[in-house]
Image: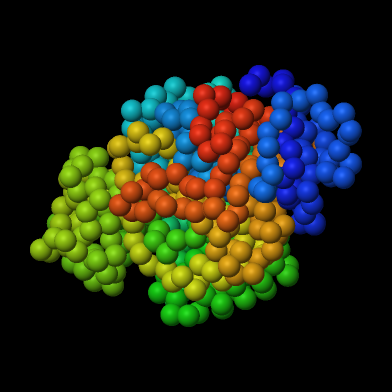
Amino acid sequence: MAPSERTVILSGTVVDGFGGGTFAGDLLIADGRVEAVVPVAARPSAGYDAHPVDAAGAIVAPGFIDIHAHSDLTRFEYPGAESRITQGITTEVIGNCGMSAAPTGGDTAGLASVIGTIDVTPQTPRPWASTRQWLDALDEAESAANVAALVGHGSVRHAVAPGTPGALDPGQLRAMRAEIADALDAGCAGVSLGLMYAPGESAGEQELRAVSQAASDAGALVAVHLRDYDARALADSLGEAAAISSGASLQLSHLRATRSDGRFGEVIEHVERMRATQDVAADCYPYIAGHTTLLQLLPPALRAGGTEAAMTATSAELAAALRASGWDAGRILVMKASRTPDAVGVCAAAQPDPWAWLAELLRANDALVDVAVESGAWEDVDLALATDWVTIGSDGTSLSPAHRSSAPHPRSWGTFPEAFRRMRAQGVGLAAAVRRMSVDSAARVGLRSGLRAGMPADVVVFAEDELGSPATFAQPALPATGICDVFVNGVRVLDGGRTTSARPGRLRRRERAA
């Protein structure tokens, strides 16, 4: 189907994404945009001069927007974006957690120390140096899905002050602000901070305020991976995020609590108080297992000097620190360890000495080891999903079934159907659920979404009673069920549940203040 071909999606239950009522209607698409939304009762007697798509019995909604993704490099490797399209995602926001694939500062290899956890396709060429060049490359890359990008503070810090673990001098701070301002001017949707990861964890308040001020000056978003998600420290982490956001729109990334012991309701109440005085929202994913670097299980004091300093510890010291961390070895699964691939997919508890084994993996892989850690509670997940100001972010990546270099978290393939199912089970209405999975996220990053005339024709057609997320840690690349058709910029990329060869996805640059 050519991009310019008129298409009409007939007889679906139309949910426009703006939170109003639903109705039986037709959606007319032309030239990559929504031409009209027509109630069935107002359908022209002569019909439409357009290619028909039958949506009887299905829901027709704006394409889902993944506000928190990490496909900075996989977009170039997997143009079919199967893990996105098959769950109804038409746009994903990358560059989160302080990690973006640019700027490189001319040191692409060195940037790996910052973005290692999202670099699951090390074979991907990286010909860019600046954020502008990366954005242009994203725009030119063939893909089935759209993408918007944040610029990561950690990547910018590496570019302007490589290997500097402590405070930046005034010249470096000016260079950082200039780099961020240029990235936002080029179309980045905002700035991300990774306060749990190097080098963001060593940045002081002055530096973080400067970063947030640059975003605020541009009317852009600041997305924050908090310093600590442990329920015992989460109030302090939220307070820090509020203090450094400098009037910018604040997005709390993957809001959750580890070791919450039933206290997650207090977290929601804390954010409600923040929202009374600031522009604050959050996102979440519908799983109790997270995905992070193995280094993050070490105590902050051991990580304070950066990765290289942490790895000066002996294997015995690393093992002792991991053992004392309080984590359950039976809940730690290795997801990426490129130099020891046989370890991928192995639970630490399967080893005679789990902590010594993990320590040796760190050393053998120069600390570039990713793990999934089951640390949340389902009641917390459902409370977040029931909260109206929480949108959906997979924290996953755009992949194909052929991906083999790491074990993906099932959230890369199943987040949105699973979130939708759990939201509805919590009593969230159909219109509200769709709004939170599309238009609300778009507004946070300065994009347009929704089924109104003139809007981009990013559309998902799905059967609610068939929605499912069969992906598991054992079989993480199983596609979602119940997603019937997906259109990106007016072009059909999923046809009756099967991906097409169309690659209409583009970079979506920030159009207005978030």
Q: Residue furthest front?
A: 45
User: In terms of image quadrants, where is residue 282?
Assistant: bottom right
Left or right: where does residue 161 sit relative to residue 93? left
Q: Quadrant of the N terminus?
A: top right
Q: Residue at x 66, y 19 (%)?
A: 2
Q: Residue at x 18, y 56 (%)?
A: 359
**Residue 173 seen by the camera:** no
Q: Position of residue 373 (x, y in %)?
A: 34, 61
Q: Residue furthest bottom?
A: 262
User: In terms of image quadrants, where is residue 303?
Assistant: bottom left
User: In terms of image quadrants, where is residue 268?
Assistant: bottom right
Give the color scheme: rainbow, by chain, secondary structure or one colour: rainbow
Q: Residue furthest left?
A: 352
Q: Residue at x 89, y 33 (%)?
A: 45
Q: Nearer the viewer, residue 454 or 160?
A: 454
Left or right: where does residue 248 sit relative to residue 374? right
Q: Position of residue 382 (x, y in %)?
A: 54, 69
Q: Residue at x 46, y 53 (%)?
A: 469
Q: Is residue 187 above or below residue 411?
A: above
Q: Position of residue 343 (x, y in %)?
A: 20, 48
Q: Report the number of numbered marks.
A: 0
Q: Is residue 392 above or below residue 364?
A: below
Q: Position of residue 422 (x, y in %)?
A: 55, 64
Q: Nearer the viewer, residue 58 or 221?
A: 58
**Residue 365 seen by the camera:** yes
Left or right: where does residue 8 sit relative to residue 260? right
